[in-house]
Image: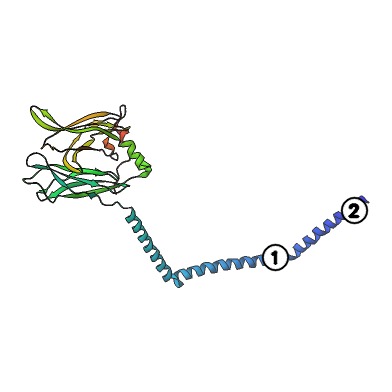
Amino acid sequence: MENGGVLLEAEKEFQKRYRLSSWWIGHRDALKKILLVLFACADAAIVAFVGWTFVDAYLVSYADEQRATLELAAYGQSDLRAYSSATAAKDLSPGSAAALSSTEGKYDLYSVLTNPNDDWWAEFEYAFSSSAGETSFARGFVLPGEEKPIVSYAFASATMPKSIKVVLSDVVWHRVDHHETGDYDRWIADRVNFVVENAVFERVDVDGKTVGRASFKVTNDSAYAYYEPSFTVTLLHGSSVVGVIGTSLSDIGAGETRDVVVNWTGPIPSNVGKVAVKVSVNPFDASAYKPLEGETAGDARSTVPTRGSR
């Protein structure tokens, strides 16, 4: 009985397969034709779509597409111009200029130059124009966000210069590369960190003659040594500048403290209330760095970004 049941199930499975095989043999050609027709229809639809796209692009909608493209380009230029204007460097801003007595028949012309940009520093040439004529041009630089005194020393004039103006020329802007510097405030603090202490101005006797003398102590509280750091010593009475003189060191090492003394060559101001000292080095200029002991000049140049102009 059990064997008969198994044979019956096998016969049913055989009959099912036989019917499927017979159906496939009988309808195979018809199915192939149907698939070919469907493929041809799909191919024809693709060809028709591509053809219509070309006809629409170059005949039907060509003028509208060209107009839209020109409008997009124009809007893009406007956006680019707006972005460039928003991020461009703002002009340097010189403050009011003054003439200070130097030696007999000569005057020091003084002003403060402000760079209002946080991401740009500048190299420039400057001179002073006044009722007594124009000084020779000198070169200078100003760092991002810096207020920096600019001076033309010992300008010869028979009378006190008046109507003094600062003349800037050949201004070259350099954008701060934040890929090189990272956070600029931290970068500049690591490199330009001069501590000035005990700045005083006094009268002293030298060979029986009374002269003015400014002195101060400066410490390079950074890990970088520099060639020729320069100093502008400004004498103040309240907020008024009554005297100015400049000096420089041949070099200063990292962590080094130096005593600086500057003798006053002109008339001695009698009402000095404060002595301000501005230290100037350019951390973007690779040649300003002095190699540390055991390093070569090439090593110093590799520690800062190279110059680049706008």
| Mark 1 residue element | helix
* Residue that mark 1 sits on: 31
Horizontally, residue 22 falls left or right of residue 265, namely right
Please name the colour scheme applied to the rendered image.
rainbow
Q: Earlier in the sequence, mark 2 or mark 1?
A: 2
Q: Position of residue 261 (x, y in %)?
A: 18, 31
Residue 197's place in the image compared with 100, above or below, is: above
The reply to whether residue 304 is visible in this rendering is no
| 275 versus 158 height, above or below | above
> Looking at the rendered structure, which numbered label has been put on residue 14?
none
Whether residue 146 is visible to the viewer of this picture, yes or no, is: yes
**Quarter residue 297 falls in:** top left
Towards the viewer: 258 or 120: 258
Instruction: Give how far across and how far down residue 206 sits, in percent.
Output: 10, 28
Q: Count all numbered tags in the image, as a single digit.
A: 2
In terms of image quadrants, where is residue 195? top left
Location of mark 2 (residue): 5
The amino acid sitting under disc 2 is: Gly
Q: Position of residue 146 (x, y in %)?
A: 27, 44
**SS assignment at label 2:** helix
Disc 2 or disc 1, which is closer to the eye?
2
Q: Residue at 58% across / 66% down in the picture?
A: 43
Q: Nearer the viewer, residue 33 or 286?
A: 286
Amino acid type at image mark 1? Leu
Q: Give the crowd class for mark 1: few <14, some 14-19, many >=20 residues within 10 Å.
A: few
Q: Residue at x 19, y 40 (%)?
A: 236
Residue 77, quarter of the rendered image: bottom left
The x, y position of residue 232, in whole percent, is: 20, 38
Q: Residues within 10 Å of mark 2 (few under 14, many from 20)?
A: few
Q: Residue furthest bottom?
A: 60
Residue nearer the viewer, 234 or 252 = 234
How far apart are the alpha carbons under marks 2 and 1?
Answer: 38 Å
